[in-house]
Amino acid sequence: MNRSLIRWVLLAVSCVGFLFAGHPVSAQRAKPKAPARLYAFDATASEINITLKQDGLMGRRYPTHRVLAKSFSGKIELPADETKIEIEVSAETKMLTNVDATMSEFERKEFHASLRGPILEADKFPAIKFTSVSVTGLQKDADVRTFTLNGDLTLHGITRRVAFPVTVTLKEKELRATGEGKLKQSDFGLTPFEKGMGLIKIGDEVKVGFSIIAKTQ
């Protein structure tokens, strides 16, 4: 290779180096993703409730029974891709509480003894847990989101995949979520309570509703 050709090659290499120096590779890289927002449940302002249907003769007096989770906690991780939202909820089994307004305290005591004892076995299975798996059908309208939340519910030591239609409202430092779904006790190895030759008979299907307020950490 003659000297003239070598000079041209060196000149070309220098030009390429100059071009890259003026346009650093780092400037062409994608911007880093925004960190996920973390929310913790405000249990004092939130509610998880279970509605049981009374199929026995006592249904004339108590068509339904309303039970609240009196002790629960949860967290939400919301990334930029909202379909990747992660939710965890845990409630104490022994703190499930009947709040029927017309029920006597004696009846309520008996109700709790059955619910927390032979039915849910709270001493053996102290927690009810839900962990999200996926979100489907996400729709956005300003600060409101609607979607189906799919996740694993662990109750009475058995885990089943469940789905809840959810509506979420996002604020600067707060998230509000409401939803409602139905479950069958038998899917979790539970035998619906029955007593007195059909006098008291709780239906297999229960309705679970929630109204959650969570705040940024």
Image (cartoon, rainbow, N blue to C red):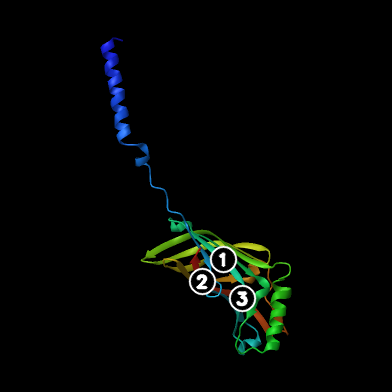
Could you tell me which secondary element the residue under label 3 belongs to? loop
First in sequence: mark 2 or mark 1?
A: 1
Task: Estimate the spatial distance between the alpha carbons at disc 3 and disc 1, rounded to whole Å.
Answer: 13 Å
Residue type (three-letter) at the residue carrying disc 3: Lys
The quadrant holding residue 30 is: top left
Q: Residue at x 68, y 85 (%)?
A: 108
* Quadrant that contains the N terminus: top left
Total numbered labels placed on residues in the image:
3
Q: Are marks 2 and 1 in contact (CB under 8 Å)?
A: yes
From the viewer's perspective, is 12 left or right of 111? left
Give the residue at mark 2. Answer: 212
Disc 1 residue type (three-letter): Gly
Mark 2 to mark 1: distance in Å? 10 Å
Report which quarter residue 12 is drawn in.
top left
168, 181: nearer the viewer? 168
Read off the residue under disc 1: 74
Q: Is residue 205 left or right of residue 105?
A: left
Q: What residue is rendered at 29% in x and 18% in y?
A: 9
Along the viewing direction, whichever of 166 and 95 lies nearer the viewer: 95
Q: Give the image location of residue 213, x and y in percent.
A: 50, 71
